[in-house]
Image (spheres, rainbow, N blue to C red):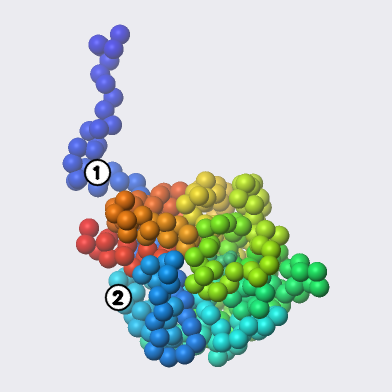
């Protein structure tokens, strides 16, 4: 029977680079990337982060220089994380206008006005217990008492120069609390990128070293989502959109591309995904050993995130990837 029916040949469209380019469905570019920057107190310091090769903790002066370089590569946005000068029970350095994040936002906004600035809104880098909110006496993170603190952080970052605030704490109701506080303080044009779907993941390990934000007891499972749950992701996304989130994030990225796809299909918000520190560290370690081709692996991973439905990719690979795409 096969003799009279010709073979169907998808390979016709793979024959050479020109035709492959013509039919390529997913294209990534520097426009898609956000580069995370860690800022520290002091002046003229650059500290390597051991578990995140080629990433650094920088004082604000050096963060400005890096931001200039990033903008020069065509990357549109950076997300700022900070290590504070002091920690306390409430994480009050998170809304201190003199903290590294606020100073970095102001300095980068002035030096590189075209770069979009995203502030990470959370308390875990600022509390002396390392949890993402205020604790009750028995060590549970108190949702409702944490909300006004997060709103304060968001307003302080917006005042310093953030175009977008990105709450990563996973408290219920925080998007509404932040939106109301921003609007009340005259920041109605500051957008909210909500870490709506943030899993209690082991892939955050290197970040917690970098940001000194590991919980001093217990874990984050009472507020971050269970990696086994997918339907819950849709519920979280719907709640945050309803509360006024402009962009919905799924985090981590690689082990959660099914979630990226579902949230993309079932909402009408732009979707961001966070290619987190553990994902980055694994690639860097394997590349250093010569076990993988770093450039090809990274571009393949970033393409997969976009193919799954991510409009925005927050990644420590952004600088390398932007360079590779320029020279491709
Ligand atoms: C803060 C926060 C974390 C990350 C981003 N914001 C860590 C955490 O929840 O412990 C992780 C980023 C990464 O691993 O690259 N809550």
Q: Is residue 208 above or below residue 12?
A: below
Sequence-first tag of 2 and 1: 1
Q: Secondary structure at mark 2?
A: helix
- The residue lying at 32 percent from left, 70 percent from top is 74
Mark 1 C-beta to ligand 1 under 8 Å: no
Q: Looking at the image, can residue 323 be seen? A: yes
Counting from the top left corner in percent of width and height, residue 6 is at: 25, 18
Crowd around label 1: few <14 · some 14–19 · many ≥20 (10 Å): some
Pinpoint residue 56: horizontal percent, then vertical percent: 41, 75
Number of marks in picture: 2
In this rendered view, identify the residue nearer to me: 267 or 38: 38
Q: Quadrant of residue 88?
A: bottom right
Whole-number angstrom distance, CA of label 2 to CA of label 1: 29 Å
Return the x and y of residue 208 as percentages of the image width and height. 54, 68
Ligand 1: give its quadrant: bottom right
Which residue occupies the foreground of this view, 319 or 182?
Answer: 319
Residue under label 1: 20
**Outermost residue, front side:** 289
Q: Residue furthest right?
A: 137
Position above or below: 80 against 241: below
The answer to whether 61 is drawn above or below residue 297 in the figure is below
In this view, the residue in front, 158 or 187, is 158
Q: Is residue 151 visible?
A: no
The one nearer the camera, 283 or 151, is 283
- Compared across the picture, whether 227 is left or right of 296 comes to right
Task: Tell me residue 239's x, y (percent).
Answer: 67, 58
Give the quarter of the figure containing the N terminus: top left
Q: Which residue is mark 2?
A: 72
Tell me the tag on residue 212: none
Q: What quarter of the picture does the C terminus occupy?
A: bottom left
Identify the residue shown where x is 67% and y is 74%: 129
Give the residue drawn at x 43%, y 72%: 49
């Amino acid at each position: 029977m096969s003799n009279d029916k010709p073979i169907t040949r998808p390979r016709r469209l793979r024959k050479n680079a020109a035709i492959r380019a013509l039919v390529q469905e997913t294209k990534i570019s520097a426009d898609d990337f956000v580069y995370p920057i860690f800022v520290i107190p002091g002046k003229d310091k650059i500290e390597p982060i051991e578990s995140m090769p080629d990433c650094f903790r920088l004082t604000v002066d050096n963060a400005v220089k890096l931001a200039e370089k990033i903008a020069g590569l065509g990357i549109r946005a950076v997300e700022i994380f900070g290590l504070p000068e002091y920690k306390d029970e409430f994480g009050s350095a998170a809304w201190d206008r003199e903290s590294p994040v606020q100073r970095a936002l102001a300095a980068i906004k002035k030096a590189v006005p075209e770069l979009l600035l995203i502030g990470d809104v959370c308390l875990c880098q600022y509390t002396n217990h390392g949890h993402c909110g205020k604790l009750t006496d028995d060590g549970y993170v108190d949702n409702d008492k944490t909300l006004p603190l997060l709103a304060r952080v968001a307003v302080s970052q917006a005042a310093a120069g953030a175009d977008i605030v990105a709450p990563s704490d996973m408290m219920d109701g925080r998007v509404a609390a932040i939106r109301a506080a921003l609007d009340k303080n005259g920041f109605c044009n500051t957008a909210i990128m909500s870490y709506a779907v943030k899993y209690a993941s082991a892939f955050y390990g290197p970040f917690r070293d970098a940001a000194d934000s590991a919980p001093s007891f217990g874990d984050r499972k009472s507020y971050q989502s269970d990696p086994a749950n997918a339907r819950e992701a849709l519920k979280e996304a719907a709640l945050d959109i309803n509360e006024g989130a402009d962009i919905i994030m799924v985090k981590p990225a690689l082990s959660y591309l099914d979630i990226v796809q579902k949230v993309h299909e079932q909402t009408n918000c732009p979707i961001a995904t966070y290619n987190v520190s553990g994902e980055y560290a694994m690639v860097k370690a394997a590349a250093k050993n010569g076990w993988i081709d770093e450039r090809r692996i990274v571009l393949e991973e970033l393409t997969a995130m976009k193919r799954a439905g991510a409009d925005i990719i927050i990644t420590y690979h952004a600088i390398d990837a932007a360079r590779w795409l320029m020279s491709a």
